Amino acid sequence: MIIKNCLIITNDENNSFYENGAVYIKDKLIEDIGNSSDIVNKYDDEEVIDFEGKLLMPGMICAHSHIYSAYARGMGVSKPTDNFFNVLENQWWALDRQLTTEDVKLNALTTYMESIANGVTTVIDHHSGPNSVENSLFTLGDAAKEVGIRTNLCYELSDRDGKEIRDKEIKENIDWIKHCQKEDDDMLRGLFGLHASFTLSDESLENAVKAMDGVYDGYHVHIAEGIEDQWDCQRKYGKRIVERLEDFGIITENTLAIHCVHINGREMDILKEHNTPVIFNPESNMNNAVGVPPVNRFIEKGLKVGLGTDAYTNDMFESMKVANIIQAHNTQDPTKGFAETLDMQFKNNPEIVSHFLNHEVGRIKKGAYADLISFKYDPYTPLNENNWGGHSLFGLTGRLVNDTIINGEFVMRDKIITKVDQAKIHADSRQRAEKIWSKL
């Protein structure tokens, strides 16, 4: 199909910009892009959809989230949450232990639908639910297929629920990664999930690495989110977290290092040496009061820094807004944050995700996957190739997204989710959430 008559932000290498542009989508990929009249005349046998002056840009990417936390919206917590460990134990771990396979499916459907509604076309997720481990990643994958979103999944390995469950968690990761490798479908990819150093013994890390031998070397791990994690590692093992993980061969170019709030220069150097991306989750870090990672120092060190949400929101425009201001606030330097945040979302996130795929995402260019979003956006200042980043940060929001196309298909059209019954899923989720809440 051809989508014509739109203002196009390509985010390609040349920062191409079209005031009355068109995109030709062939199967899953972008085949051509140019001025509307040129593209329509060139491919005169194709279906043409008139976007009537809407703004079109590449779909947004969330580089770290937690689908399992979906029921937490509006949930009350009766036990203390006065420090990071208590937040984990009394809120998140209390919740994930209640989840059944039915809940995993509902959490995935609601999270994916809201992501699509906010213009997010790819979600990298880090799942947990120790009493519903088996087939949980396959359940998430089935939900992703139903709504039509691109996703990369893992299960967080942890010692917190005993060795029997730990071994199930290892198996689930390996089974999922092998499945994704066999299918080689860029809509579904897998990494090996690790919770954090303080919940993983040497034995568990050894078992994980042994299971991954000959399979893959890509991990998805929380690093020094809270200072307590760093203290625990130094006290138990006489080394810092990134050093410990490197000793196990876990720090690789296929690994995602999440948070990294409390790492030092030596750890940054190790991550840089292995080309390991770091994922910044600004709103979650602030909400959990764990601190602000030294993002500007990461960048000075040459680290690739991506942007996630840690499930605090499913709107990457919101995450961008906070990423921008918290960097300026934390450094007390108003020149920090703006350019860095745009790079995280529009340069680094596409590179991080595309690294795992056969074709690029996050760009409107020939050969890239057709993951596109449109807005009914009527700016009251000029919008052009030189200032679209400012409009992205200060004008656009997820709630303005009108259409979402993933892999060449509409998954939301005129704000209606196309592939599933959103109202029914929300109703089912409300019923289940109420039952879960009564147990907490």
Image (cartoon, rainbow, N blue to C red):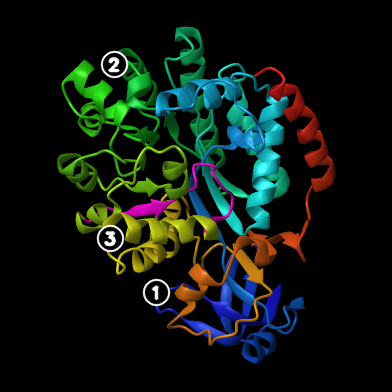
State the CA–CA distance, disc 1 to disc 2: 44 Å
Segment tinted magenta in the rendering: 302-316
Q: Please tell me whether residue 310 belongs to the stretch shown in magenta.
A: yes
How far apart are labels 3 and 1 at the CA level? 32 Å
Task: Tell me where residue 5 appears, x and y as whole percent.
Answer: 68, 84
Which label is found at residue 270? none
- In this view, the residue in front, 25 or 146, is 146
Three-letter residue code for mark 3: Gln
Residue marked by disc 3: 332
Element carrying mark 3? loop
Question: What residue is drawn where x is 37% and y is 67%?
Answer: 338
Q: Residues within 10 Å of mark 2 (few under 14, many from 20)?
A: few
Quarter of the rendering occupied by the C terminus: top right
In the picture of the structure, the residue carrying the numbered disc 2 is 202
Q: Is residue 188 visible?
A: no
Crowding near the residue tagged with mark 1, few <14, some 14–19, many ≥20 C-alpha atoms within 10 Å: few
